[in-house]
Image: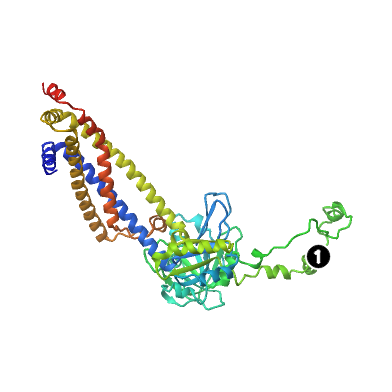
Amino acid sequence: MKEIFKLALRNLKEHKSKTIIIALFLVFGVAIVVLGNSFLESVNRGLEKDFRNNYTGDIAISIKPEKGTMIDLFGYQTTDISSAMSEIAAIPDLDKVMQIIENQEGIKAHTKLIGSKVLVAKGLEMDFSDFVERDDIKFDDLPIAMIFAGEQDTYRTVFPDVNFVSGTYPAAGTNEVIIDTRVQRACKSLYGEEVKIGDTILLAGATADTVIREGVVSGIFNPPDENSAMFQIIYCNPEMARSFAGLTYASSFSQDLPDSIDLGLGGMSEDDLFGGFDDDEAFSFIEEDDSFLSTAATDFDAILGDTSLRDELNKTDDGSWQFVLMKCDRPYMTKKIIAELKQKFAEENVNAQVMDWKMAAYSYSGTVEGIGFIFNLLIFILAVVVFIIIMNTMVVSVIERTSEIGTMRAIGAEKKFVQRLFFSETIFLTLVSSVIGIILAFIIMAVFNACNIVITNSIAKMILGGGLLHFTPTPSIIITTIVIALIGSVVSNIYPVSSALKVTPLKALNHGE
């Protein structure tokens, strides 16, 4: 084996031009793979740390979504762009769900959450005409936010890292809110006025059934991670959040209606109901005084009848929650706990789904996974091209080395010897080139990381999983890259080696002549 290795080194030196060509392809290919996967690893780690610590916890529970849709903390995710946005329903059988969670080993703490999307207006009027009239308004200037409300006693324990700039948490049972500094900047950009402690703002639900509520700003805070991909947030009390999320008693109310309703109109015809006035007499009964309005009000009340049931159904359901969020004693046990909870929910016939942090934050993690898929697809295409070039280069090398191969065969070299020689050359060249490519990648990463490049655009942050552009290489990335490079190089040499083994001493002598 030692002799084969020495002979392989000599052959690589003698064919310098082809050795350098193949080495360069491998060096840059390995460097690109290491750089790309190190960046994706950094994005995934940063996203996971941010969301698990501050928003989703380790495990999240919600109602099961309808077929063709997904649910995360930010709403329904669907490919049907024609469907109207709807709010997430409350978890059914919440008492049973909580009983299962309380008896589950490995859960350190848990809390409940309500979330919805809202538009923010400064003052007591909601005028978004600037969206259309001003060309300088960008996406980051839009006063759009996620409104979150956690369980009063537990949410701050599970997610304690609210970085206050000024103010305090909303007082229980009030319409007070605390706003993200990014919401504050958006209001400043759009309305020309900065939102301060004590100011009143209007919040409008971003769904078809628009709900508008007043909020009094009691605090202003920075995100726990200044480079977080998380969208801007407003925290409020659960009572207010339930109105935006549609968590009223009506949402869970059901009552069988009769097949037909008797309105007490007897045999009156359409003409009897709506006829009897000509054009001149239609509004002749309206006098200049306000007696008509008072009479009309009385008539409307009579028409509406008893509205007490409607009023009760429009009240928010104090016991309803969209999510239960949990943190585990040992985060590495999350998958095992999720599997056990799923089994218990199935046994108890509970209509709820169990999610890890990635599924609970799919609006963000799904985007990063998509970028990773596209990157690895491009790398695969690049690798195929590179290995085809290597194969063609090796075929040319075999043709040029016909005399050498034939001579070795003539003096007694077996096919296995020739085969080992070519594969030794390939493996040695791949290993050396991969090491050089990894060193090159580490140099580039060190320079890039030292620059601390940060992006501030909200859309770019969501796509890239955060604002800090960073590389985090891991041993698994390095080892996997080297193994793939070796396998690809060996596979690309199968055809050239098989061609080399077909060379006989007679062919070598004819080639020499």
Q: What percent of the width, then of the height, locates residue 473? A: 28, 57
Is disc 1 surrounded by few (<14), some (14 to 19) or many (20+) residues within 10 Å? few
Q: What percent of the width, then of the height, locates residue 389? A: 25, 36
Q: Quadrant of residue 44?
A: bottom left
Q: For the residue marked with disc 1, what is the amino acid?
A: Glu
Q: Is residue 406 above or below residue 325?
A: above
Figure colour scheme: rainbow
Q: Give the residue drawn at x 82%, y 56%.
A: 282
Q: Is residue 235 visible?
A: yes
Camera-side residue of 407 and 112: 407
312 with respect to 29 (left or right) = right
Camera-side residue of 223 and 371: 371
Q: Is residue 117 visible?
A: no
Residue farthest to the right? 267
Q: What percent of the width, then of the height, locates residue 431? A: 20, 47
Q: What percent of the width, then of the height, locates residue 300? A: 77, 66
